[in-house]
Image: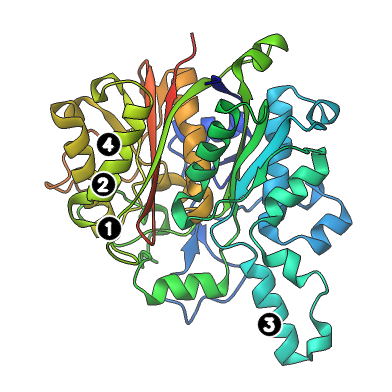
């Protein structure tokens, strides 16, 4: 099997755009949650989200803004950032040996809302002829492949909140098998919209802490009351090791393990004691050829929901045993909110940065510890610590779990 390394990072998040800014935001414990002002939330129970407030239109041309849904725009911008970070050129990526694996949990929900309103406020003739490609999830991978001329394997795995991890894991396997030398991989989501907010709020999944949005995302705390919706994208450049070495690339980390599992239990609730999550963790670690005791950091799924945080903590204890109490476990969702399909991608980037920098991001808003959740969640302040192996967890509605393992590259 070929060895696979990460050589470029492209995060687009509410706490920082680009690798350096995103990493700084994590280490500063930056809060990326704010009250929504671009649409009326007065009849929605939750009024805040982790939004991209920076005007991104100056990074795209007029047609890209007009004909691409926001999730597609995010994917392209994040890819541009990752390509620059990797030191690659468009000419180098125009190849049959370069592929794309980019997903989205929901796709163009903004385009759905806009065009639905056009139909009922005016008439069906006003619906955009680009409506269908603006909504389907695979168009993120599609427009990225077109932009760079990436002619190799192209896919879009959609597994709700584990989408980002699943696509990076799929890309890892593609390179392992020798089907590509470079993969542009990750995920994107732009679901901070009326329909998404109302849907998640009505199912009681969101935090309703409208009086204090900046502290609403509080994973593993006794007073946690739901997740905070976020938006953004994460793209990584993955290369076959010899290809990266030949061009003198900076190597952030090596990908060494990946696994998925199904809870086969419930549409939204995790399996009791996190049994499905534990199975994915255990298999990913086994796939990496290491023991649980070698893992130093876990980037938790950590959504700030009562059931989810408990199940993940139980799963970590089941997999790591006594070593669970020696692990650094943090949830960067405390800062960014939950990016749904894009969550796993930006959290994979955070995991890689923890390895490369020797700095572990904190879980902010650690205010009132839950006695049932008693692991080391790196409370409130980043920590300097050498990490040889980091694990990133992602768990999804439908009980679809994905876990990936990264190794410090020597």
Query: Is residue 122 left or right of 404 when viewed as pictured?
Result: right
Q: In percent of the image, x 74 and y 87: which residue is there? A: 119
Callout 1 crowding tier (Cα within 10 Å): few <14, some 14–19, many ≥20: many
Of marks 3 and 4, the one in the foreground: 3
Tag 1, which secondary structure?
loop
Of tags 4 and 2, which is closer to the observer? 2
Cα distance between the residues tagged 2 and 1? 9 Å
Residue 331: image location, x then y, percent: 36, 41
**What is the distance, in whole Å, between disc 4 and disc 2 at their CAs?**
12 Å
| CA separation in Å, label 3 and label 4 | 43 Å
Give the alpha-carbon distance from disc 3 to disc 1, as whole Å. 33 Å
- Counting from the top left corner in percent of width and height, residue 254 is at 50, 21
Q: Which residue is mark 2?
A: 312
* First along the sequence among labels 3 and 4: 3
**Mark closer to the chain start, 4 or 1:** 1
Q: Which residue is mark 3?
A: 116
Decide: few, some or many residues near mark 3? Use Cα within 10 Å; few <14, some 14-19, many ≥20: some
At horizontal 31% and vertical 37% (from top left) the residue drawn is 281
Label 1, on which residue? 270
SS at badge 3: helix
Quadrant assignment, res 403: top left
Q: Earlier in the sequence, mark 4 or mark 2?
A: 2
């Amino acid at each position: 099997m070929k060895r696979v390394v990460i050589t470029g990072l492209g995060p687009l998040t509410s706490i920082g755009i680009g690798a350096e800014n995103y990493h700084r935001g994590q280490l500063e414990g930056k809060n990326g949650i704010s009250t929504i002002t671009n649409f009326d939330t007065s009849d929605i129970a939750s009024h805040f989200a982790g939004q991209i407030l920076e005007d991104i239109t100056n990074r795209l041309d007029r047609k890209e803004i007009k004909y691409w849904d926001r999730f597609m725009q995010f994917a392209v911008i994040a890819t541009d950032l990752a390509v620059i970070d990797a030191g690659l050129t468009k000419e180098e990526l125009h190849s049959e040996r370069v592929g794309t694996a980019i997903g989205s949990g929901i796709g163009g929900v903004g385009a759905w809302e806009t065009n639905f309103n056009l139909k009922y406020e005016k008439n069906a003739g006003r619906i955009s002829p680009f409506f269908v490609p603006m909504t389907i999830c695979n168009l993120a991978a599609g427009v990225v492949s077109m932009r760079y001329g990436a002619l190799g394997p192209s896919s879009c795995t959609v597994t709700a909140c584990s989408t980002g991890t699943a696509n990076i894991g799929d890309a890892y396997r593609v390179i392992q098998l020798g089907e590509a030398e470079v993969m542009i991989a990750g995920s994107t989501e732009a679901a901070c919209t009326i329909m998404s907010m109302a849907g998640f709020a009505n199912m009681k999944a969101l935090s309703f802490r409208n009086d204090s949005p900046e502290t609403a995302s509080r994973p593993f705390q006794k007073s946690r009351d739901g997740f905070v919706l976020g938006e953004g994208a994460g793209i990584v450049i993955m290369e076959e090791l010899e290809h990266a070495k030949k061009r003198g690339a900076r190597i952030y980390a090596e990908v060494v393990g990946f696994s998925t599992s199904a809870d086969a239990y419930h549409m939204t609730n995790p399996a009791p004691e996190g049994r499905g999550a534990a199975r994915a963790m255990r298999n990913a670690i086994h796939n990496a050829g290491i023991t649980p005791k070698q893992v130093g950091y876990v980037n938790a799924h950590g959504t700030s929901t009562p059931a989810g945080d408990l199940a993940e903590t139980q799963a970590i204890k089941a997999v790591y045993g006594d070593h669970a109490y020696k692990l650094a476990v943090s949830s960067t969702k405390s800062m960014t909110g939950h990016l749904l399909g894009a969550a796993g991608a930006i959290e994979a980037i955070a995991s890689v940065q923890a390895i490369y920098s020797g700095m572990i991001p904190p879980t902010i808003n650690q205010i009132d510890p839950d006695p049932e959740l008693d692991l080391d969640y790196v409370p409130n302040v980043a920590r300097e610590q050498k990490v040889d192996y980091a694990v990133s967890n992602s768990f999804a509605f439908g009980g679809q779990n994905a876990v990936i393992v990264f190794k410090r590259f020597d």
